[in-house]
Amino acid sequence: MSTLKTAADLIAGERRKAYGEPDAHFAAVAVIWSVLLRRDVPARMVPLMMAALKMARLSHDLDSEDGWVDLAGYAGLGGDYDDHD
């Protein structure tokens, strides 16, 4: 199965069941990060920051299939993010 297909399947299935709707989850994470950082973190930044984390991890293991799948997933979710503005 391709990396993009695997990411899409996880986003629509297993991860959605575990974490709920991505936009709502990113909004909740943004609130927590905003408190911790003492500055406003827009929810739209969450998938970008998570993608950065995945890239940092991949720099230590370029063969991590899970890392590439997660990076593709965050890129897709970030590109499709709808903050309802």
Image: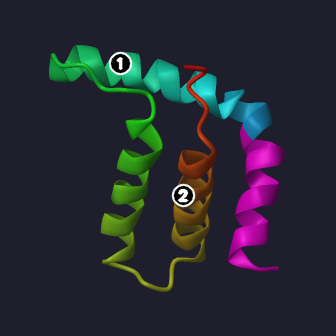
**Dominant SS in magenta:** helix
Residue pointed to by mark 2:
75
The answer to whether residue 22 is above or below residue 59 is above
Question: Residue 42's spot in the image, x, y percent?
Answer: 37, 26
Residue ranking furthest to the front: 85
The answer to whether residue 63 is above or below residue 71 is below
Residue drawn at 50 percent across, 85 percent down? 63
Q: In terms of sequence position, does the residue under pointer 2 or pointer 1 come before the other?
A: 1
Q: Quadrant of residue 17?
A: top right
Mark 2 to mark 1: distance in Å?
Answer: 21 Å
Q: Which residues are magenta?
A: 1-15
Q: Quadrant of the C terminus?
A: top right
Identified by mark 1, the residue type is Ile
Residue drawn at 35 percent across, 56 percent down? 53
- Foreground of the two, 65 or 42: 42
> Are the two marked residues, 2 and 1, in contact with CB atoms closer than 8 angstroms?
no
The answer to whether residue 9 is above or below residue 11 is below
Question: Residue 40's spot in the image, x, y percent?
Answer: 25, 19
Q: Is residue 21 left or right of residue 64?
A: right
Question: Residue 52's spot in the image, x, y percent?
Answer: 34, 57
Identified by mark 2, the residue type is Ala
Looking at the rendered structure, the secondary structure element under dot 1 is helix
Looking at the rendered structure, the secondary structure element under dot 2 is helix
Mark number for residue 13? none
Crowd around label 1: few <14 · some 14–19 · many ≥20 (10 Å): some
Mark number for residue 32? 1
Q: Quadrant of residue 55?
A: bottom left
Q: Quadrant of the N terminus?
A: bottom right
Residue drawn at 30 percent across, 26 percent down? 41
